[in-house]
Image (cartoon, rainbow, N blue to C red):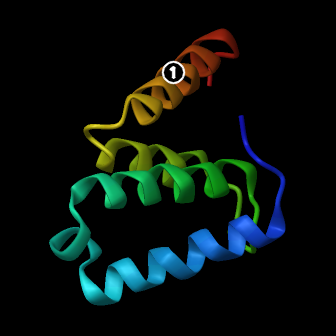
């Protein structure tokens, strides 16, 4: 479930920008980067924090979080939703 907290959304975006610029995975481990991929995927899916709603972008971020059970679960839900509505 998505947390509706604008401050948390803004923090996630700041961390994401830091991770891209300073290669967060090299300094803190890949789990932190996986967490951020899931979080940014959630923001894309819901169209929050100034990001456009995009299922394709959300799925891309979920796929990049290879070790995250939450990312795999979110992808499975998206797949099931697409099958249900023939998307």
Farthest top residue in view: 84
For residue 39, which quarter of the picture?
A: bottom right
What residue did someone put label 1 on? 79
Farthest bottom residue in view: 21
Residue at left offset 28%, top offset 75%: 24
Most foreground residue, 55 or 27: 27
**Is residue 57 rendered to the left or right of residue 20?**
right
Q: Is 86 situated above or below 61?
A: above
Q: Is 60 situated above or below 68?
A: below
Split into 4 quadrants, where in the image is the N terminus? top right
For residue 10, which quarter of the picture?
A: bottom right
Split into 4 quadrants, where in the image is the C terminus? top right
Farthest left residue in view: 26
Residue at left offset 75%, top offset 74%: 50
Q: Secondary structure at mark 1?
A: helix
Q: Residues within 10 Å of mark 1 (few under 14, many from 20)?
A: few
**Residue 82 x/y as whole percent:** 60, 21
**Residue 30 x/y as whole percent:** 23, 57
Q: Is 73 situated above or below 28?
A: above
**Is residue 74 rendered to the left or right of residue 9?**
left
**Residue 63 x/y as whole percent:** 34, 42
Most foreground residue, 74 or 1: 1
Most foreground residue, 78 or 25: 25
Q: Report the number of numbered marks.
A: 1
For residue 83, which quarter of the picture?
A: top right
Residue at left offset 70%, top offset 16%: 85
Residue at left offset 43%, top offset 52%: 35
């Amino acid at each position: 479930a998505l947390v509706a907290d604008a401050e948390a959304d803004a923090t996630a975006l700041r961390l994401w920008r830091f991770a891209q610029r300073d290669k967060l995975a090299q300094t803190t481990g890949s789990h932190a980067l996986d967490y951020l991929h899931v979080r940014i995927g959630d923001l894309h899916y819901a169209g929050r924090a100034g990001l456009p709603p995009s299922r394709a972008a959300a799925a891309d971020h979920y796929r990049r979080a290879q070790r995250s059970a939450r990312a795999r679960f979110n992808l499975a839900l998206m797949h099931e939703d697409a099958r249900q509505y023939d998307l």
